[in-house]
């Protein structure tokens, strides 16, 4: 009898804590998406009148039936996948080292991991353009030490976009993995060694499965950020390699075809939600035991 | 099942010696407890034996074979950790199987060894449970089964009971002791809990500041401490500073107290007299016999009553008595006399 009112009050506090964020999201996320959805159903007349007052599904059909657009979707997904894989491969050893450090050393490495996020996206991307161009630092160095005869084209290529995106998004992966690795009791590694396991067995049977929550959350973060990245594909890739983000920008801002732009945005959102929820359900099944 | 020999085993971290060249022999099937305050080097010693810490000097011999340079996964030892260190993503049976697979035990043999090990620790039927679904005591039993299944030469316990609640801790002590005697595996048991060490071990190694203070069976360690540290650390002890005047001990404050003849050559340097509180007889009134004093404090500790007695010299003596009847209670301020059997008062250098 005495517990009930107190509980109620605590529930109210929780509601209050969540309220501002909920209102914000409803207004500017759900609301905006709703208007985007309405806009995607409008007709469009190129050149003359632009957006029409009609309601139709032609924009979705235009996207789905056009191999050019579908190819861009495929390219974007592939790009995000490679960036995610790259971040995982580069990020895991780094996160492992970070999770093992203590005190000042950890603080320094943690800061070093975060440094890329302190630079503006545009400036950072210009930096990559200088590095990646045919006469850029990377190619010049490789040629001068005789590893290659002619420059490897990376600017205005997918390779360049992926390299630059991996650098930008690596911190997100590392921080997610670090959090997961920190959660693993160190005595577990000792126990595994004591039970006779070598380093390879420990990595695949202990470290990797226990880091799975971090791998999943980091991958979701990186994949989402990569597929919606705009500045890097726009500058490093240029108009020759459109991805979803640059395509939406082009439709909306350059061609003023807002209905098609809105439709493409929503298609991308749906594709992303489907992929990520499939990924999460697989991962959560694997993790259910661990948690 | 093997003997263990530590030969001038030492470990230096930076400028500080965590373990200072210790020597120890552990017999086959023996259970030896390493007891000491935190930072005394007991855990470092255990981790050197396990192979997790590389010794700075000396060697480790198991069954006469030098294993000092062997990596931990190639030593045939089973370690039980304070945090249990079970694999949270594996069920009980998979946890026990992990070591068997890592050591390439034939596939046909694994299932049988798992069943046998779980039976040994009384967890048959828990094969499919995950560590999160088990109590602390059950988890520690799984950890025990996990190492017992490997039939190790040596069992290493690193404060395995410290995370359990008091009642369970006492119960698990006896279980581990019984199990260890049943399987007869030579064992090291690190603990900071003297009661635990006393119950579980054949012999206790008392460590302090990286050195071994004393090695011996529990009773000997308690009744015949060789150093001030041991007398002070194990149980409660009255430690009175003073010096020897011929055959008589004289405290720094001037009290002349009975004591056993020293078993070291007296040098004239200050010595300390050590006597356990329960060995002291306390008599009411200021009559004949015993050293006179006054009760300063009386505290009831369950079945015991603890008195602090101030002697005429100003030295204070702690006395413990069985609380048999309220009629025997002494009041604060009451004059009393304390006395003891000369042999119970030992001199320490």
Image: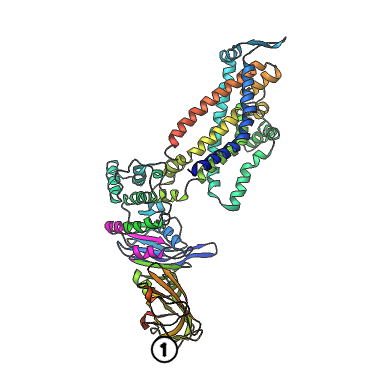
Question: Could you classify mark 1 by the number of other residues whose Cα lies within 10 Å: few (under 14), some (14-19), or many (20 or more)?
Answer: few
Closer-to-camera residue (B321/B47)? B321
Q: Which residue is mark 1?
A: B247
Is B192 covered by the magenta stretch?
Answer: yes
**Where does the image place residue A80, in percent across and percent down from the top left?**
57, 29
How are the colours assigned in the image? rainbow
Q: At 28% from the left edge and 51% from the top edge, which residue is drawn? A: B120
Name the element at disc 1: loop
Picture quadrant of residue A61? top right
Locate residue B234, reporting x and y percent: 41, 70
Query: Does the segment drawn in magenta span residue B132?
Result: no
Work out which residue is located at the far front of the displayed protein and give it.
A1
The residue stretch that appears in magenta: B177-202
Q: Is residue A152 above or below residue B181?
A: above
Q: Is B121 situated left or right of A20 in this image?
A: left
For the residue pair B315 and A221, the one nearer the viewer reads as: B315
- Residue A170: image quadrant is top right
């Amino acid at each position: 009898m005495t517990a009930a009112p107190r509980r109620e009050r605590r529930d109210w506090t929780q509601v209050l804590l969540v309220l501002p964020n909920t209102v914000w999201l409803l207004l500017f996320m759900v609301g905006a998406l709703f208007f985007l959805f309405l806009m995607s159903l409008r007709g469009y007349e190129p050149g003359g009148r632009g957006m029409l007052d009609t309601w139709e599904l032609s924009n979705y059909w235009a996207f789905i039936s056009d191999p050019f657009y579908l190819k861009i979707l495929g390219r974007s997904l592939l790009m995000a996948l490679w960036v995610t894989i790259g971040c995982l491969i580069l990020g895991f050893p780094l996160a492992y080292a970070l999770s093992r450090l203590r005190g000042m050393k950890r603080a320094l490495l943690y800061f070093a991991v975060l440094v890329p996020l302190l630079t503006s996206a545009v400036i950072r991307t210009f930096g990559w353009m200088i590095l990646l161009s045919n006469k850029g630092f990377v190619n010049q160095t490789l040629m001068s030490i005789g590893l290659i005869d002619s420059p490897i084209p990376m600017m205005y290529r997918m390779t360049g976009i992926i390299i630059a995106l991996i650098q930008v998004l690596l911190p997100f992966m590392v921080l997610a993995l670090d959090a997961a690795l920190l959660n693993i009791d160190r005595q577990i590694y000792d126990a595994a060694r004591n039970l006779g396991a070598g380093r390879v067995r420990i990595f695949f049977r202990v470290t990797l499965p226990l880091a799975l929550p971090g791998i999943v959350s980091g991958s979701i973060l990186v994949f989402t950020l990569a597929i919606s990245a705009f500045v890097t594909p726009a500058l490093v890739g240029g108009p020759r390699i459109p991805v979803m983000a640059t395509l939406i920008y082009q439709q909306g801002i350059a061609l003023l075809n807002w209905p098609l732009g809105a439709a493409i945005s929503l298609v991308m959102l749906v594709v992303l939600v489907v992929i990520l929820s499939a990924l999460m359900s697989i991962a959560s099944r694997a993790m259910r035991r661990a948690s | 099942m093997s003997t263990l020999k530590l030969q001038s085993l030492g470990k230096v971290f930076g400028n500080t010696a965590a373990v200072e060249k210790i020597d120890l022999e552990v017999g086959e099937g023996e259970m030896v407890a390493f007891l000491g305050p935190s930072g005394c080097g007991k855990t470092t010693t255990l981790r050197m034996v396990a192979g997790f810490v590389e010794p700075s000097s000396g060697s480790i011999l198991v069954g006469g074979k030098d294993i000092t340079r062997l990596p931990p996964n190639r030593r045939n030892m089973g370690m039980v950790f304070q945090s249990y260190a079970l694999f949270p993503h594996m069920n009980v049976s998979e946890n026990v199987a992990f070591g068997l697979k890592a050591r390439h035990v034939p596939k046909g043999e694994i299932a049988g060894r798992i069943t046998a090990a779980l039976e040994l620790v009384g967890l048959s039927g828990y094969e499919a449970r995950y560590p999160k679904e088990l109590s602390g005591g059950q988890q520690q039993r799984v950890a025990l089964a996990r190492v017992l299944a490997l039939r190790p030469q040596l069992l290493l316990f690193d404060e395995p009971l410290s995370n359990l609640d008091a009642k369970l801790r006492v119960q698990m002590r006896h279980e581990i002791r019984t199990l260890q005697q049943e399987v007869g595996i030579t064992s090291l048991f690190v603990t900071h809990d003297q009661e635990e060490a006393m119950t579980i071990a054949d012999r206790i190694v008392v460590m302090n500041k990286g050195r071994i203070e004393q090695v011996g069976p529990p009773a000997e360690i308690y009744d015949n401490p060789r150093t001030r540290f041991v007398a002070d650390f194990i149980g409660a002890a009255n430690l009175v500073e003073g010096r020897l005047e011929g055959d008589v001990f004289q405290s720094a404050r001037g009290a002349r107290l009975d004591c056993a003849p020293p078993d070291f050559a007296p040098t004239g340097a200050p010595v300390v007299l050590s006597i356990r509180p329960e060995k002291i007889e306390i008599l009411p009134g200021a009559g004949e016999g015993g050293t006179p004093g006054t009760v300063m404090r009386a505290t009831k500790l369950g079945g015991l009553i603890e008195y602090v007695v101030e002697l005429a010299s100003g030295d204070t003596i702690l006395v413990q008595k069985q609380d048999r009847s309220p009629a025997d209670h002494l009041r604060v301020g009451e004059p009393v006399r304390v006395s003891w059997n000369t042999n119970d008062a030992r001199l320490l250098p």
